[in-house]
Amino acid sequence: MTVTVETTGGRLGVGQGSMYLSDLWAWPDPALSHEQRDVVLRRLCETAARELPRLAGNDRLHPLEFGLQLHQWACHDLDIAEDPPSLARAMCISPFDAAVHDAVGAAVELSAFSFYDEPTPLPLLDRYFPQGGASSIARLMQKPRRELPAWWVVGKYDDLADSLEPAIKKHGYRSLKLKITGSDPVADVARTIEVFQFATRLLDAPPTITVDSNEANPDLSSVVEYLDRLEANDAAAFAALAYLEQPTGRDIVVDRFDWRSVTARKPVLLDEGLTDLEILPEAQAQGWSGVALKTCKGHSMLLAAAAWAHDHGMLLSLQDLTNPGVALIHAAAVGAYLPTINGAELNSPQFTPDANDEFLPRLAELFIPRHGVHRLPAAWPAGLASCL
């Protein structure tokens, strides 16, 4: 999708944004079929497209301030009979937020990540930051990395010889995200060790691994048992474990645990539970190590949450929702500018490679990992200049 903006100086800019509508992840409601949920989310996107000019109004807004207003409208103010959760609502408006930032960057011929170099009032953000939100985001930014680790997702039941071995031999993957059951620590430990040892035999150094149970762990004790068993059975595999993505239920107010006994050993990052900035103090109080950012929650929400977490000494990672094409470029730019501990998970080359054909071969080094890394171009092609 594309968005056209006009800046205060009268410049016009056209920006792009895209996102898969993954109701299976953002709205896993068994009371409604996939088809029913998909219809609702598509309708929400169409409503956002119609309402975007009205939501912008006649005010001259910073793009992040507009993005936070858009988040508030979609996630809290918009009345939808089927009432999709905030995660699904944020996913639907995320390409609009990205496209607005891209368009403003194109109009003023600046990176969208440089909008915070000067003090800028951002009322919706500033109430979370005593020193001002723009300054916190500016402190968050780093000189952009030109290489990002390439991550391969290992499914719970993948045949490693058929899937992981060709990926390592062809592309050099050395960063592995493991999907585990969460409900069976014995099986999960055995699988983690199997994957770790299999990859180690193919590489010249042990791989980095993370684990994701997709919130299937029933409680904190199951996570502790997994770590205890892993450390006891394979110290090298335990050492290679970089962090765990949200192990327990996404509503951390309902599924409340004190994570300090875990985070003293390995980081645990809040993912699906991060839907609004208001949840961040609660996450910190519960001892979560940091946040797993996703562009599908909105560029403005992402930067605001990242800045708050960074200011409060929390870790950042950037996870994927299988972003192809323009969405992959966006995520790569976020991973380049933000101090994420994993670079950026960019998994559309694994799951939907054909969706990236439009950008090949000109961005082949970004879209097709070599020697285990994605390489960002020194300059983006015309039309995407505001991304980096």
Image (spheres, grey):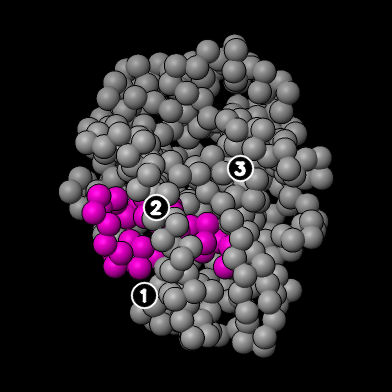
Contact between marks 2 and 1 (CB within 8 A): the answer is no
Which disc, if any, is residue 128?
1
Q: Which residue is mark 3?
A: 324
Element marked by disc 2: helix
Nearer-N-terminus badge (2/3): 2
Quadrant position of the C terminus in the picture: bottom right
Where is residue 7? Give x, y as percent.
Answer: 63, 82
Q: Nearer the viewer, mark 2 or mark 1?
A: 2
Secondary structure mostly seen in magenta is helix
Residue 349 placement: quadrant:
top right
Q: How many marks?
A: 3
Magenta stretch?
Answer: 71-100
- Of residue 160 and residue 94, the one placed in the foreground of this image is 94
Residue 281 placement: quadrant:
bottom left
Quadrant position of the N terminus in the picture: bottom right
Which residue shows up at 64% across the image and 41% down it?
149
Marks 2/3: CA–CA distance: 22 Å
Left or right of 217? Residue 379 is: right
Identify residue type, mark 3: Pro
Q: Nearer the viewer, mark 2 or mark 3?
A: 2
**Callout 3 crowding tier (Cα within 10 Å): few <14, some 14–19, many ≥20:** many
Q: Which residue is mark 2?
A: 43
Where is residue 90? Give x, y as percent.
Answer: 40, 56
Identify residue type, mark 2: Arg
Q: Is residue 264 above or below residue 304?
A: above
Contact between marks 3 and 1 (CB within 8 A): the answer is no
**Callout 1 crowding tier (Cα within 10 Å): few <14, some 14–19, many ≥20:** some
Contact between marks 2 and 3 (CB within 8 A): the answer is no
Identify residue type, mark 1: Tyr
Which residue shows up at 49% across the image and 74% down it?
53
Marks 2/1: CA–CA distance: 32 Å
**Callout 2 crowding tier (Cα within 10 Å): few <14, some 14–19, many ≥20:** some
